[in-house]
């Protein structure tokens, strides 16, 4: 679990490997970064969802940073079929 700062409120990002996702609960909403494993050493981040009331707070960025950090720590080959994650890989 990694804490993240979003609009002045400390939130926790939870990795749920059995559901292949990173989750951030804010207020009564959930923001999620989904991934699929590609063989033993690969991962594809395929969908990021932040509910409308939570957008613009940096939550998607925090989810992607945590997901990419995890994949790099695990020495995985990273793919991104999600446009938002792909943008982070290009930059």
Image (cartoon, rainbow, N blue to C red):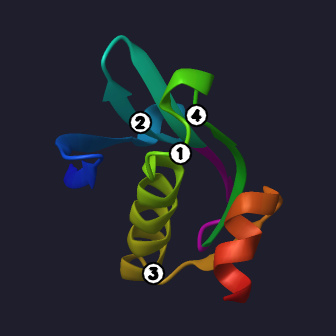
| Residue 56 numbered tag | 1
Answer yes or no: is residue 72 visible.
yes
Task: Please state the horizontal and vertical placement of residue 66, each as a whole percent of the image.
Answer: 39, 62
Mark 2 highlights which residue? 23
For the residues marked 1 and 2, what is the alpha-carbon distance in whole angstroms?
A: 17 Å
Q: Earlier in the sequence, mark 1 or mark 2?
A: 2
For the residues marked 3 and 1, what is the alpha-carbon distance in whole angstroms?
A: 26 Å
Task: Determine whether 56 is above or below 62 in the image.
Answer: above
For the residues marked 2 and 3, what is the alpha-carbon distance in whole angstroms?
A: 18 Å
| Residue 72 numbered tag | 3
Q: Earlier in the sequence, mark 4 or mark 2?
A: 2
Question: Of residues 42 and 40, which is closer to you in this image?
Answer: 42
Question: Nearer the viewer's eye, disc 4 or disc 2?
Answer: 4
Mark 4 highlights which residue? 50
Q: Which residue, as the protein is rendered here, is positioned at the far bottom?
A: 91
Question: Nearer the viewer's eye, disc 3 or disc 1?
Answer: 1
Q: Are marks 4 and 1 in contact (CB under 8 Å)?
A: no
Q: Are marks 3 and 1 in contact (CB under 8 Å)?
A: no
For the residues marked 3 and 4, what is the alpha-carbon distance in whole angstroms?
A: 23 Å
């Amino acid at each position: 679990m990694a804490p993240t700062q979003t609009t002045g409120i400390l939130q926790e990002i939870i990795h749920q490997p059995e559901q292949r996702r990173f989750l951030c609960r804010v207020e009564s909403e959930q923001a999620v970064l989904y991934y699929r494993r590609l063989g033993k050493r690969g991962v594809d981040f395929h969908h990021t969802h932040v509910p409308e009331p939570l957008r613009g707070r940096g939550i998607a960025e925090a989810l992607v940073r945590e997901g990419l950090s995890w994949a790099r720590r695990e020495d995985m080959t990273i793919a991104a079929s999600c446009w938002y994650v792909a943008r982070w890989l290009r930059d």
